Image: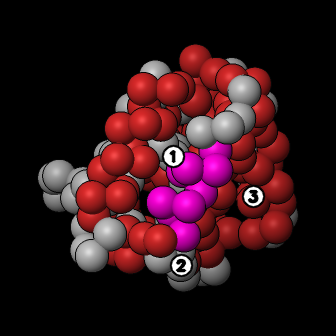
C-alpha cells in the first residue's frame, strides 16, 4: 500500500488526530478529511494548502496556541512536540539567546501573540532578523504572514504523516 492509499483508508478519527498534530486548527484537518479519497499526494497537499490559506484569524490563534515560543523547547512526548523540537533545533538558545528572547518579547508586546515562523533550516540569527523586521508590519500584514508561516509548518508536518504511511 502506498502513502496515498494509506491516507485514504485511515479511520477518520485517527487521521483527524494525525492532522491535529500538523495544525491544531480543527477546520484545517476537517477540510482535508472531508476531501478523501485523494487521487495522489499532490491533491492532498493542494487541499491542505488551500485549507491553511482559508483559516480565519481565530482559527490561526487556536493553532498558534499549540506552538511554543520560538527558541523554547516544546514540552511533552506528543508527535507535535517532537516535530517542534526538531523544527526549532537551530533556534535553540545559543550565543545570540538574549537577542532571541528580546525579539520574542518585543514581538509579543507589539502583536499580542507568539512570533510564529517556519524555522526549519533557519539559523537563530536569521530568525531574530525576521522577528525584528516583522515588528514594522501593520496588523493586517502580519496576520497574513503568520497565516502563511503556519501553513508552511502544517504542510511540512503533513509530508511527515504521508511519509510515515509508506
The C terminus sits in image quarter: bottom right
Q: Answer with the quarter of the image where residue 33 lies.
A: top right
Q: CA distance from mark 1 to mark 2?
A: 15 Å
Q: Residue 28 at what x, y percent from top left?
A: 63, 36
**Circle 3 residue:** 44
> Residue 121 bears which disc, if any?
2
- Residue lying at the far left in this picture: please name it: 76
Judged by depth in the image, the label closer to the viewer, 2 or 3, is: 2
On the rendered structure, is 57 left or right of 93? Answer: right
Q: Position of residue 14 (x, y in %)?
A: 42, 47
Question: Where on the picture, by quarter, is residue 30?
Answer: top right
For label 1, the residue is 116
Above-or-below relation of 120 to 84: below
Q: Which residues are magenta?
A: 126-134
Mark 2 residue element? loop
Q: Earlier in the sequence, mark 3 or mark 1?
A: 3
Amino acid at each position: 500500500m502506498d502513502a496515498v492509499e494509506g491516507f485514504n483508508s485511515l479511520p477518520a478519527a485517527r487521521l483527524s488526530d494525525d492532522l491535529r498534530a500538523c495544525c491544531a486548527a480543527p477546520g484545517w484537518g476537517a477540510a482535508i478529511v472531508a476531501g478523501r479519497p485523494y487521487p495522489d499526494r499532490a491533491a492532498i497537499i493542494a487541499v491542505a494548502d488551500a485549507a491553511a490559506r482559508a483559516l480565519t484569524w481565530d482559527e490561526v490563534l487556536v493553532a498558534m496556541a499549540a506552538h511554543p515560543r520560538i527558541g523554547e523547547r516544546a514540552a511533552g512526548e506528543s508527535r507535535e512536540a517532537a516535530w517542534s523540537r526538531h523544527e526549532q533545533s537551530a533556534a535553540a538558545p545559543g550565543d545570540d539567546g538574549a537577542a532571541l528572547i528580546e525579539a520574542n518579547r518585543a514581538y509579543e508586546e507589539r502583536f499580542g501573540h507568539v512570533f510564529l515562523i517556519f524555522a526549519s533550516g533557519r539559523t537563530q540569527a536569521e530568525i531574530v532578523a525576521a522577528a525584528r523586521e516583522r515588528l514594522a508590519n501593520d496588523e493586517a500584514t502580519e496576520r497574513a504572514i503568520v497565516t502563511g508561516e503556519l501553513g508552511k509548518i502544517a504542510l511540512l508536518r503533513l509530508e511527515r504523516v504521508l511519509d510515515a504511511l509508506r
